[in-house]
Amino acid sequence: MMHASTQAIEILQKYWGFEHFRSSQVPIIEAALQGQDVLALLPTGGGKSICFQVPGLAREGICIVISPLIALMQD
């Protein structure tokens, strides 16, 4: 099983207050941190946004995360 980096866990704890990632989030976060192209398919409430927000905070530069949640709620 993969483990999230210490930096990613620190970001998760600081901004979201969670102690650890869900097991389905770890490979997504690690791939994004390594600069790989990532497509994450998780169920509603599966924590997809965090999978991209955490690496966005961990890496230098600008990261834009687009989440369709509001659009889904309006439909």
Image (cartoon, rainbow, N blue to C red):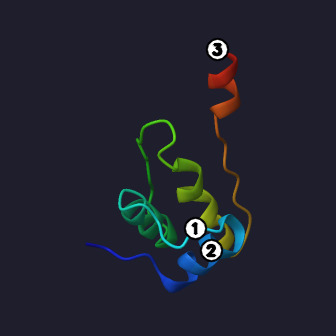
Labels 2 & 1 near each other (Cβ < 8 A): yes
Which residue position holds label 1? 18
Q: How much space separates mark 3 and mark 1, taking CA atoms? A: 30 Å
Question: Where on the picture, by quarter, is residue 37?
Answer: bottom left
Considering only order in the chain, which callout, 3 or 2, is on the residue closer to the N terminus? 2
Name the residue at 49% across, 68% down: 35
Name the residue at 60% across, 80% down: 10
Label 3, residues with CA under 10 Å away: few <14, some 14-19, many ≥20: few
From the top left corner, tell me how far across and down residue 50 is, in percent. 58, 57
Which residue position holds label 3? 75
In the displayed structure, 49 sits above or below 30; it is above
Label 1, residues with CA under 10 Å away: few <14, some 14-19, many ≥20: few
Considering only order in the chain, which callout, 1 or 3, is on the residue closer to the N terminus? 1
The amino acid marked with disc number 3 is Asp
- Does residue 56 show up? yes
Of all residues, the one furthest to the bottom in this rendering is: 6
The amino acid marked with disc number 1 is Phe
In screen coordinates, is 59 left or right of 23? right
Q: How much space separates mark 2 and mark 3, taking CA atoms? A: 32 Å
Q: In what element is the residue under mark 2?
A: helix
Labels 2 & 3 near each other (Cβ < 8 A): no
Q: In what element is the residue under mark 3?
A: loop
Q: Residue 38 versus residue 3: which sits nearer the camera? A: 3
Q: In what element is the residue under mark 1?
A: loop
From the top left corner, tell me how far across and down residue 3 is, in percent. 37, 77
Q: How much space separates mark 2 and mark 1, taking CA atoms? A: 5 Å
Q: Residue 7 versus residue 45: which sits nearer the camera? A: 45
Which residue position holds label 2? 13
In the displayed structure, 46 sits above or below 16; it is above
